[in-house]
Amino acid sequence: MDHDYAFEIAASAVRFGAGVTREVGSDLADLRATKVLVMSDPTVSRLPPVQAVLESLESSGIAFALFDRVRVEPTDQSFLDAIAFAGRDTYDAFVAVGGGSTIDTAKAANLYSTYPPADFLDYVNPPIGKGLPVPGALRPLIAIPTTAGTGSETTGVSIFDFSRLHAKTGIASRRLKPTLGLLDPENTKTMPSEVAASSGLDILSHAVESFTALPFTEHPRPNRPSLRPAYQGSNPISDVWSLQAMRLVARFLIRAVEDPADDEARASMLLAASYAGIGFGNAGVHLPHGMSYPVSGRVQGYRAPGYAVDHPLVPHGISVILNAPAVFRFTAPSSPRRHLEAAEALGADVAHRRADDAGEILADRITWFMQRLEVPNGLRAIGYTIANIPALVEGTLPQHRVTKLSPRPAGPEELGRLFERAMVAW
């Protein structure tokens, strides 16, 4: 196998500042948009961020339609609902107002209504789908996050639950990236503390996973530059963004969750989400995310507090972080120095600590955040047992796009042991 010798950094433009939501109408007018599709979920659509967007569009004389049926933790069916709505009229641009679920749904609606495929799975990542390339440029998409977590406003990735397999998968292409992300700290004022905790832990894991991912020089070289994947492995530029995201998490996550009136903390976590998005959007994530997909997709009766939904739900950040301590104990021997650097960026004292202890130190620091934020104590606390491990492994194995980025290979036996160790976190 010829290893790659290059990496590429691609990210959306972002604009940060309190009140920038109100500039969206001017931005769309500059793009010469005359009719746009605004997408949100049933809860956020009733809150000030969406109202600010609609008022800005009206003042700029831009016609719009509002789709407010986005599902929190979207499925293939909820994607299809949004795609069908987008296909009923002609829109010049899209605006997504909400968390990662809304932004990812808007990416899919933009793609599928612009270049309708023969089959829904044509664009979906292999081995579940065909992974066909996006044929050309998409219409402008402006992403306005109301949570501080996914970093979806910077990435070319769109994730959903594939109902038939009870596991998450997605679509990945640099062409999916939003044209512009408007990072407005005012929009996170209404975020419940439980949502702030889950989304903040997602930032944490994004940053650590991308920093510890298999290096880009260990990946196969593509036949053409255009075939180089968005998730290329850890690299010197992604490392900068990922480390800074960890430092912001260490300083501001607890403050942002415990005091929603702490404007500095909320604004800093919004920045941390985008920093981590630039990091993992170009380096990738690995086992904590790959293992999280069946944890979310196979949920039975667990309903997360703080989320106004009518269906069982393990929030994405929780499903990821519950696996993280076990994973980083496992991956640390591949690069103890990187795992120690991550632990230090998250606030751990690593002076005079041995390389052999790197995994334990990083896992303990992540567990400290979990305990402080009162997340469930392992997979058992959200309803899983040892008997569920084979199904969880089965749901992880197809996640090649991320699992192959693990710095230490993990087959069925290794994954089974990792899920067993994640049953109880402390």
Image: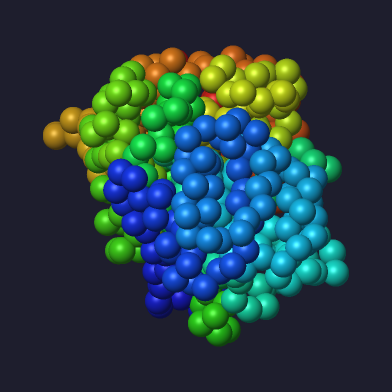
Q: Position of residue 423 (x, y in %)?
A: 58, 21
Q: Quadrant of residue 420?
A: top right
Q: Position of residue 281 (x, y in %)?
A: 46, 58
Left or right, 117 with reference to 335: right
User: What residue do we see at 43% from left, 21% from top?
Assistant: 193
Q: Quadrant of residue 339?
A: top left
Seen from this angle, which residue lies furthest bottom? 224
Left or right, 400 with reference to 220: right
In what quadrant of the picture does the N terminus appear? bottom right
Residue 172 appears in the picture as rendered: no
Q: Position of residue 45 (x, y in %)?
A: 59, 37
Q: Please give the count of numbered marks on the rendered protein.
A: 0
User: What residue do we see at 39% from left, 55% from top?
Assistant: 23
Vertical placement of residue 257 versus 232, above or below: above
Camera-nearest residue between 149 and 250: 149
Colour approach in the figure: rainbow
Residue 88 appears in the picture as rendered: yes
User: What residue do we see at 31% from left, 63% from top?
Assistant: 237
User: What residue do we see at 48% from left, 67% from top?
Assistant: 29
In what quadrant of the picture does the C terminus appear? top left
Vertical placement of residue 74 versus 33, above or below: above
Q: Position of residue 62 (x, y in %)?
A: 56, 61
Left or right, 324 with reference to 138: left
Left or right, 394 with reference to 44: right
